[in-house]
Amino acid sequence: MLSLVPKPKSDIPELASKISARVAKKSGPPVVVRSVGDFVALHNTDVFKGLNVGFIPTMGSLHSGHMKLIAAARPNHDVVVLSIFVNPAQFAPEEDYDQYPRNLEGDLKKLETESAGVDVVFAPEPADMYPKNPRAIVPSVTVEPNFVNGLSEAACRPTFFRGVATVVMKLFNIIRPKRAYFGQKDAMQVSVIISMVKDLNVPVELEIVPTAREADGLASSSRNVYLTPAMREKAPILYKSLCAAYDMIKSSKEPVKASEVEEVVKKTLLTEPMVLGIEYISVASVETAQEVDTIQFGPDAEPVLVAIAVKYGGPDLRLIDNMWMDNQQHA
């Protein structure tokens, strides 16, 4: 018989005892698990037996959007697990993997003070998640979300969604949650995960939490740390452009062509000199991510979102945002 389970690196009874104490107390710092072998070995103890586990996958550099996910998860579960892993498989060679903000110590301090909602933090190293290829440009086995081929975001980042689907499947297998929580801001990622769970019969419930925004509308993002004060001041232009699309659709008495929505968003974005280029403006189905030609209205209409990606403030900074258009609620 082949034994393919990674070996634990820690004292598992001691680790399980710490987790049990944290779950019972519901306060204090989360217990940190650093290896795949350790987490798998914990499932062979009674630490999670009979308990409802909620899971929040992140790449760290925690912000208000992550805290919103924690707040959504905490009331529903006996145990809340949050992962912190900057996934190399979703970065192309020319992208900002090495520069991506990492601050595990700072993240753990936030989790000690922010509502004490997380019981366990899973923070593995790339060599542990991808032992054959730690940089993981192409892992040896992948999950390929073929339905995204040809869509706007996938065209801009051709390997990204394969990397997302692969790491989320791995995390689901390691954590074994009842339910996982994702933010609406990453709309295309959400579509990929929904399709993966549905098509591959993954026994995990999904809850999609509305985008967390700053007071001026800027969507919360780990990459916002890249913004200079001058760039940050003008960054709400993305939100303003989506609001312009929303207002246009709400004021229309007839179905609206996607091209007209795209034009309104484009005109608004280009009023801001910090927007150096528009990668895409996508008008697409919420459920399938397939782009539509016309936005229909009424309770039977397909729900639609508008998603945008722009080069902002410099050639290496990319900002994204999206908004549901509520076309099903149209009077």
Image: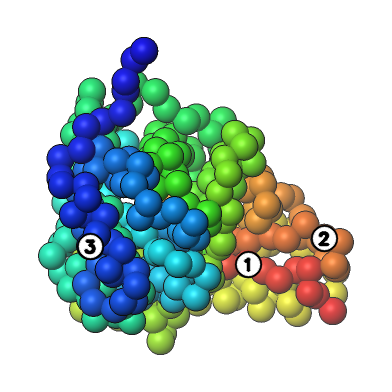
Mark 1 or mark 3: whose residue is earlier in sequence: 3
Q: Of callouts 2 and 3, which one flags the residue occurring earlier in the amino acid sequence?
A: 3
Residue underneath mark 1? 324
Q: CA distance from mark 1 to mark 3?
A: 42 Å
Is residue 227 in view from this perspective? Answer: no
**Callout 1, which amino acid?**
Trp
Q: Is residue 228 left or right of residue 234?
A: left
* Residue at (21% x, 54% y) in the render: 15
> Residue drawn 32% across and 23% down?
4
Give how far across and how far down residue 211 sits, in percent.
Answer: 49, 70
Q: Which residue is mark 3?
A: 18
Q: Nearer the viewer, residue 72 or 176?
A: 176
Q: Secondary structure at mark 3?
A: helix
What residue is pinned by disc 2?
Answer: 301
Residue 322 percent coordinates (x, y)? 53, 64
Q: Residues within 10 Å of mark 3 (few under 14, many from 20)?
A: some
